[in-house]
Amino acid sequence: LFMKTVMLAVTKFPELLGPVLDSVLPKLLADRCWRDAVLWKGFVKFAVGTLANGSVPLLLRLPPDVLKPLLDSEPLLAPALKRFIKDH
């Protein structure tokens, strides 16, 4: 429900995207959001939907044992991560 609210808020008010990427998502990662299946599903959906807007560096903060299955399950992520790494 939390991530659904975040997604709706960013859709309605696009200027919230920056603060969400800079504050909300890093806090969720620090709190290991992948341990809560519902929250993790929303986090992943939001991150995949905002790849072009800056979520890639956040995904690189994930532990390898969390990132690997995510790369396997989300086909858009691997190319985006490779592009980011190549460009930076």
Image: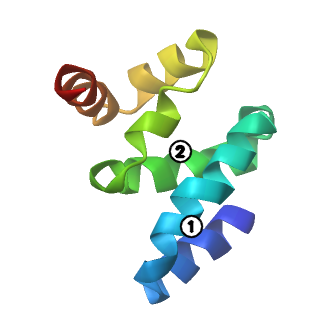
Dot 2 amino acid type: Val
In the picture of the structure, the residue carrying the numbered disc 1 is 19
Residue at the front extreme of this rendering: 88
**Residue 28 in view (yes/no):** yes
Along the line of sight, which residue is nearer the eye, 49 or 41? Answer: 49
Pointer 1: residues within 10 angstroms few (<14), some, or many (20+)? few
Q: Tell me how the rendering is colored.
A: rainbow
Residue at the top extreme of this rendering: 65
* Mark 2 and mark 1: Cα distance apart in space: 17 Å
In the picture of the structure, the residue carrying the numbered disc 2 is 44
Label tally: 2
Give left or right: position of 66 versus 30. left
The quarter holding residue 20 reads: bottom right
Along the line of sight, which residue is nearer the eye, 33 or 19? Answer: 19
Asked whether the residues under the numbered discs 2 and 1 touch, taking CB atoms below 8 Å apart as contact, a structural biologist would say no
Secondary structure found at label 1: helix
**Which image quarter holds the N terminus?**
bottom right
Q: Is residue 44 above or below residue 66?
A: below
